[in-house]
Amino acid sequence: MFPSEAGARPRTCEATASERRKWVEVFKACDEDNKGYLSREDFKVAIVMLFGYKPSKIEADSVMSAVNPNTSGISLEGFLNVVKRKKEAQLYRSEIRHIFTAFDMHYRGFLTLEDFNRAFSRVAPKLPARTVLEVFREADRDSDGHVSFRDFEYAMNYGQAK
């Protein structure tokens, strides 16, 4: 829906050499016994070190379910892939937040149809008002006349999947 109009970039990015070194250092620091992999608990500590939050049981289970059955944890390459995907998701969410903030010129924390009309008149002046209204209604999932960040993020992700 929005990404192509709003200019959102794809969700892929390459890690810099310094980022990759940092991720490897964190992996090594959390692999205390030098076993070559991170256990579930090691993985949680590494994520806390890199992202500042403890992964949920569901997130840890998801990562560990993809682990080679011959090991008891996640390898360095597996860990680097997980961290890269998490970083991409953070960057994409940050872009969505930036676009939402640009639409929310009154800093209310939600968008109105007026905000949509103003933004679209600047970026797509020939877009029919009816189309802007349809986009607004699509994004306003609970039909309360306001598009919250959560509604906006959902709409951006929905459009990305199409």
Image (cartoon, rainbow, N blue to C red):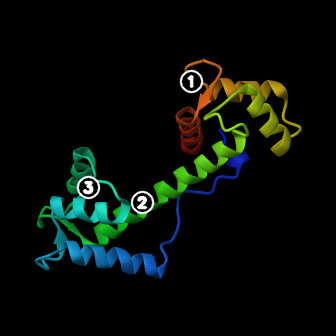
Mark 3 or mark 2, earlier in chain = 3
Question: What residue do we see at 23% from left, 63% from top?
Answer: 45
Q: Quadrant of the N terminus?
A: top right
Question: Please, what is the three-letter code of the amino acid marked with disc 2?
Answer: Arg
Say if 42 sits above or below 55 in the image.
below
Q: Contact, CB < 8 Å: mark 1 with mark 3?
A: no
CA neighbours of label 2 inside 10 A, class few (<14), some (14 to 19), many (20+): some
Q: Quick one: SS at disc 2?
A: helix
Say if 160 sits above or below 37 in the image.
above
**Which numbered circle lies on residue 63?**
3
Residue extending farthest to the right is: 126
Question: What residue do we see at 89% from left, 37% from top?
Answer: 126
Pair 1/3: label in front: 1
Say if 90 sits above or below 39 in the image.
above
Question: Please, what is the three-letter code of the amino acid marked with disc 1?
Answer: Arg
Say if 59 sits above or below 151 in the image.
below
Question: Please, what is the three-letter code of the amino acid marked with disc 3?
Answer: Val
CA neighbours of label 1 inside 10 A, class few (<14), some (14 to 19), many (20+): some
Q: Mark 1 sits on what residue? A: 141
Whether residue 124 sits left or right of residue 107 in the image: it is right
Q: Quick one: SS at disc 3?
A: helix
